[in-house]
Image (cartoon, rainbow, N blue to C red):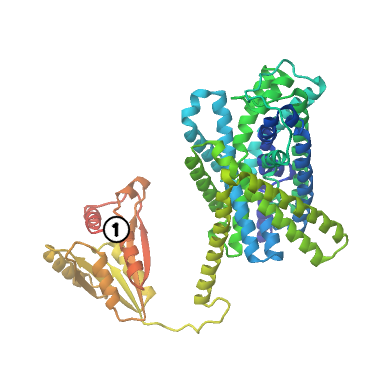
Amino acid sequence: MGTGEDTGENTAGSDERHRLTAVTGTVGLGLDALASVAYGPEAIVVALAVAGAVGMGWTLPVTAVIVLLLVVLVACYRQVIAAYPDGGGAYTVAREHLGTRTSLIAAASLVVDYVLNVAVSVAAGVAALTSAFPALLPWTVELCLGVLAAITAVNLRGVVAGARLFIVPAAVFVASIAVVVGAGLVRGAPLHPLPATTQPAAVGSVGVLLVLAAFANGCAALTGVEAIANATPSFRAPRAASARRAEACLGALLGVLLIGLAVLIERFDVRPVQGRTLLSLVTEGALGDGAGFVIVQIATVVLLALAANTSFGGLPVLAARLASDGFAPHLFGLRADRLVHRYGVGVLAVLAGGLLLFSGGEVGVLVPMFAVGVFIGFFLCQVGMVRHWRAERGQGWRGRALLNGLGAVLTATAAVVVTATKFTHGAWLIVLVVPALALLFGRVRAAYDRIGGQLGVGELPDRPRRLDTLVVVPVVAITRLTSELLSTAMAMGHRVVAVHVSYPGEFAAARAMETDWLYWRPEIPLTVLGSSRRELGPPLTRFVRDARADRVIVLIGEVQPAHRWERMLKNHRGAVVARRLSRSTDAVVCRLRLPLRPGLGSPKIAEAERTLSRHGA
């Protein structure tokens, strides 16, 4: 009794070791948001710079609005974590309060955003690398796939392993950007004149559409904020408290860095320069082009490549939640020994790899589709939370509902603006893919319901009864494998028949087989079938179809060599026959593997093995 309790405690302790703390959760699930510091401010400036100095004056106000939206989102998702500690985020909230169809739209939008985040992050990281080393440019796609494979391999070892591995580069990046902001604010002006802008000179007024375009571009910095709420079950106990701390920490870091960079951009009057990132220009103005500049650039390259880790922490948990509700294949709910949803990790890697191949690893092809789906999820989550508080009506529910209501209004506005401004640049594809994916989830659930209905799940079936069972055993030669097969068959049914297939020109061999069978006396009848085309499948299929029995079981034997390299010598004919029988008959097909020990052999065994090889055991 004591041993069992100790084992349970040890298992629980082992599980907790493989879960996230507030710090590792911020890193493991927040790299996407933190990495947006490298391209979010630049996206705002690119939109505003077309209006010249007048437009650049709007950099800080637009960034402030985005940070305000960030603050609201962080506060809202902290409430989501507290109310739904089992994870799932927008999907879970929408499923409970907005209905099944709406919840599937939320889930589909998050899945699309997670996949795009991996592709964009990897492509952006490789783009930064090839900018520093132009000789690598022809290998862009190969580098993207290599980085994706490395991140996937790390995450297959567990989300905590990934977070621990990435905590150093994340800390270096945040610290280096903080140094840039601090040094720049103290300096007040660039260390030396920055490169002149390559954008055509423009002087004009700032219209509403221009500000909206800048806001839409900058909203890319908000992707990844929801990942912590989706992956709350991955945190250590108390899970909700740890996840809420991680959410607050992520929001504080991101907000401070965005505002700090926006202030520097206006003070340094940084404009777009061909072949240079805006972050590199700000860094040069604050630190010069020495060692500090190099450290910031390398940290940026590394973090952009690793930002995909956010999706690897969030999507597998979301997929597991969908699987538990029957909207995704149940295998997505399986977890390995390090609490890894390996199927979710694998599918995410494959889909992201396909996008990288499709886009050729070019960030410009992927970015227009980015951030559209996530705001759909943001909006649905906040609306669902408003209904949650209205239904619960606990202490302080009005204030919580008001906060989520504000989040719903702001995210709905952002969703419309982002979709409208990016529609012709690729957002139209997301508008089509999200409903299609939601429809696919519904089809999976319908299939599970249909299968469950045919199985009578939830109902009492008929009482078990004895069936007239016939066990068919295909045999090639009289060997130890044959003996094991027949012994097993006799334990499976009260009628057993051995079947031997004879090929053209082997009439004498078939007669010899029958003679040896009578001499061996296994007390089981042997039926010899003819095959005109040297195939095992068709004659066995006809025999099984003509058999008169309530249930037919076909037991196929295979040898399992002791050495792995010897397994390549098998012709795998048994697997081919099993598939043929499964497709063409109602028989229950079983395969029995006989393991062989190394170092044993004799001329008779060798001859038997050659016979098995010729006939396909």
- In this rendering, position of residue 443 left or right of residue 311: left
- Residue 208 visible from this viewpoint: yes
* Residue drawn at (36%, 73%) of the image: 586
Q: Furthest-top residue in view? A: 192
Splitting the image into 4 quarters, where does residue 176 fall? top right
* Residue drawn at (63%, 52%) of the image: 110
- Residue 155 visible from this viewpoint: no
User: Could you say where residue 553 lies in the image, as x and y percent from the top left?
Assistant: 35, 73
Splitting the image into 4 quarters, where does residue 103 fall? bottom right
- In this rendering, position of residue 156 left or right of residue 483: right
Residue at the disc numbered 1 = 573
User: Could you say where residue 508 lies in the image, as x and y percent from the top left?
Assistant: 11, 65
Residue placed most toward the observer, 519 or 138: 138
Splitting the image into 4 quarters, where does residue 203 fall? top right
Please name the amino acid that badge 1 sits on.
Answer: Arg
Asked if 506 appears above or below 312 in the picture, the reply is below
- Quadrant into which the C terminus falls: bottom left
Crowding near the residue tagged with mark 1, few <14, some 14–19, many ≥20 C-alpha atoms within 10 Å: some
Asked if 46 appears above or below 509 in the picture, the reply is above
User: Could you say where residue 52 lies in the image, as x and y percent from the top left?
Assistant: 71, 28
Asked if 135 appears above or below 95 in the picture, the reply is above
User: Could you say where residue 301 lies in the image, as x and y percent from the top left?
Assistant: 61, 30
- Quadrant into which the N terminus falls: bottom right
- In this rendering, position of residue 84 left or right of residue 606: right
